[in-house]
Image (tube, helix red, strand yellow):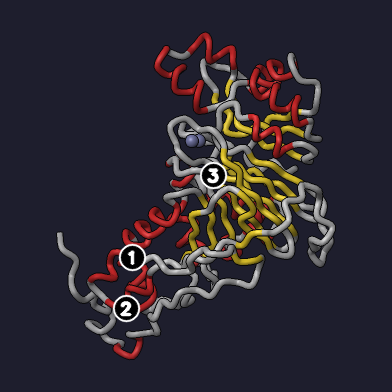
Amino acid sequence: MPLPRELPCPIRRCTAPTACNKDYSGHIAEPEREGKLKPGRSTGAIAAPLSAVRPALLLIALGVLTVAFLASPARAQMPGLAQDDDRSPTKLVLLGTGNPNATPARSGPAVAIVVGERAYIIDFGPGIVRRAAEAARKLALPALKAENLRFAFLTHLHSDHTAGYPDLIFTPWVMGREQPLRLFGPRGTEEMTKNILEAYKEDILNRINGLQPSTERGWQVNAQDAEPGFVFSDRFVRVEAFAVCHGSWDQAFGYRFTTWDKVIVISGDTTYCPVVAEMAKGADILLHEVYSQKAFEEELSADWQAYHRVSHTSTRDLARIAGAARPKLVVLYHQLFWGGVTEEDMLAEIAADYDGAVVSGKDLDVF
Ligand SMILES: [Zn+2]
Ligand SMILES: [Zn+2]
């Protein structure tokens, strides 16, 4: 069905014409002055499809920022990074340790790295914002209140990791977020963002032109298709993306976060991938996905074995990764429970080949 040429202001048809036509310039968000700009990378905006029918909506387009990246490839902890004013230690918060299965106790894949006042979200499976709100309250972490969710990193575009994306864009806006969401991800992130904004255009227009008080820029997204390497820095974190091996995806990322007191490496979804061990050498925490080798052999049909063998990491292979990296702590997430296998079973399988510290993560665990 063709789009209307004019998206009417609903208030104009009603009783409060002066409420119409709030500044809907939708101007592209200015990049924050954080990190260095990647040489040669365009800062051009992505035009949203509905721009074809309403010029003003050209400006719904995403503000595609240049990638902030660092010149130094140093792997060491970064003494130049700031502590927050309260000098609190960096926290890794598991917002969702689930997978595509709709397990009530395990929300969709999402984690947060919290440094004082700021939260950095990695993946946004279903339930992301409510789990973050729960963590904000139960763990006394105001950085995870909805309106404070401003920075996100995506490992790959599988739906279990992205089904919470509209939630991450719009719920914080409705709750008062003033700044655009800033997001880095693999190829396709910009396109997904553009299409989500297009899908929600009626909601955006209604909230901006209607009676509801709303911030001007909180619905915008500065989305960036990133490449492996340093992708972002601010005064609290330096973030490096690295390519992992996830089945037929041509690009999927893991991330290495460095803060003033911790190095945290997140595998994303990957099969056995030696680069993860390389990135996790000397890390404080390696957060890694996993499935049970025993359950894989006993419970899966040949076609599902073929899929998982190249897409996810067995307990046996995770022990190899951990043994090569020797992080201070391995945390399991995105656990695939087949045939009644338990966390204890997985930990025992890993312990058979690796003697370091390993714990199985649950939603709202903090490390
Ligand atoms: Zn997944
Ligand atoms: Zn996946």
Which residue is disc 3 drawn over? Answer: 155
Residue positioned most to the top: 298
Q: Residue at x 26, y 77 (%)?
A: 10
**Circle nearer the N terminus (2, 1):** 1
Secondary structure of residue under mark 2:
helix
Marks 2 and 1 in Cβ contact (< 8 Å): no
Q: Position of residue 52 (x, y in %)?
A: 24, 70
Left or right: residue 211 versus residue 35 is left
* Of 235 and 173, the residue lying toward us: 235
Cβ of disc 3 within 8 Å of ligand 2?
yes
For residue 265, which numbered disc appears in the image? none
Q: Which residue is mark 1?
A: 48
User: In terms of sequence position, does the residue under pointer 2 or pointer 3 come before the other?
Assistant: 2
Figure quadrant of the N terminus: bottom left
Q: Are marks 2 and 3 in contact (CB under 8 Å)?
A: no
- Residue 105 makes an appearance in the image: no
Confirm if mark 1 falls within 8 A of ligand 2: no
Q: Nearer the viewer, residue 297 or 39?
A: 39
The disc label shown at residue 56, or none = 2
User: Does dot 1 land on a helix, a strand or a loop?
Assistant: loop
Q: Amino acid at mark 3?
A: Thr
Label 2 environment density (alpha carbons within 10 Å; few <14, some 14–19, many ≥20):
some
Q: Amino acid at mark 1?
A: Ala
Q: CA distance from mark 2 to mark 1?
A: 11 Å
Q: Position of residue 320 (x, y in %)?
A: 70, 22
Q: Is residue 272 left or right of residue 322?
A: left
Q: Is residue 55 left or right of residue 267?
A: left
Q: Quadrant of the C terminus?
A: top right
Task: Identify the element where label 3 is drawn.
Answer: loop
Quadrant of residue 340 within the rendered picture: top right
Q: Earlier in the sequence, mark 3 or mark 1?
A: 1
